Image: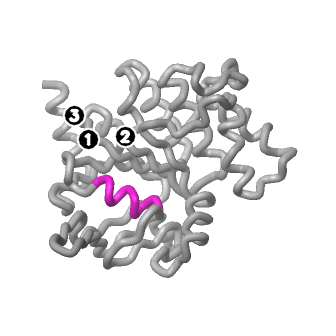
Amino acid sequence: MKEHPIIQANHLSKIYKTDLVETVALADVSFEIKKGEFVAIMGPSGSGKSTLMHLLGALDKPTSGIYILDGENVENLTDDELADIRNRKIGFVFQAYNLLPRTSALKNVMLPMAYGGIPKENREEIAKKFLKMVGLEDRMSHNSNQLSGGQQQRVAIARSLVMNPAILLADEPTGNIASAQAEEIMAIFQRLNEEGHTIIMITHEPDIAQHAKRIILLRDGKIVEDGNGYRQKIIGKGEG
């Protein structure tokens, strides 16, 4: 039996309206993402990539079009059901880390499991496993505000994995860290992808996007490039 795409975006549009102005943030965007892909969504400021990220993350609903995430149509879900699908199916990694500051790395990683119904006796063991996976076995008891930016992002990646999500959704994941640490973070994403994780990454940086295997380029709310060809162009420019 043919496997369904993990993401199906069919003619998604998002229009913001006020009394005087109608702003089209996303216009008739369609694409599919298969399980195990590593996709970068690129575009300049105002291109619609943040709007698309909010739709893919079930943080917002489209004005029109259909979004199916791992077989579930999000269109008719209530706010509580959207919150549930976010916790079960999406691992978020944000530019600003979104960690609790005076809380240990271990407890930060355990937090989604408390909301997700994982038995209390299992949470610590699972959290330790993923912190070891991102190379932080010696920093588990440190509070997040005692860690470097790169280490905080590793905690965020570990936290994103504990619910075994269908996709990892990373929003400008290297935006707040030094370039050497950014390369380490991207190496972790590449390793996770090689292990079978589906990763969607929002970025405006070509040198970060080229770590993905496919690039979707947005401009003025529309897809203008999609595929490996654009990625090869970026790599070529980098080598030149």
Q: Are marks 1 and 3 in contact (CB under 8 Å)?
A: no
The residue tagged with tag 3: helix, strand or loop? helix
Q: Quadrant of residue 68?
A: bottom left
- Position of residue 214 in the picture relative to residue 165 (left or right): left
- Residue found 66% across the figure and 37% down from its top: 108
Report the residue marked by disc 1. 204
The earlier-in-sequence mark between 1 and 3 is 1
Residue in the foreground of this view, choosing between 183 and 191 = 183
- Position of residue 56 in the picture relative to residue 153 (left or right): left
| Mark sitting on residue 235 | 3
Residue in the foreground of this view, choosing between 175 and 22 = 22
- Asked if the magenta segment contains residue 151, the reply would be no
Residue type marked 1: His
Estimate the spatial distance between the alpha carbons at disc 3 and disc 2, rounded to whole Å.
19 Å
- Residue found 79% across the figure and 38% down from its top: 124
| Image colouring | one colour
Numbered range of the magenta stretch? 49-57
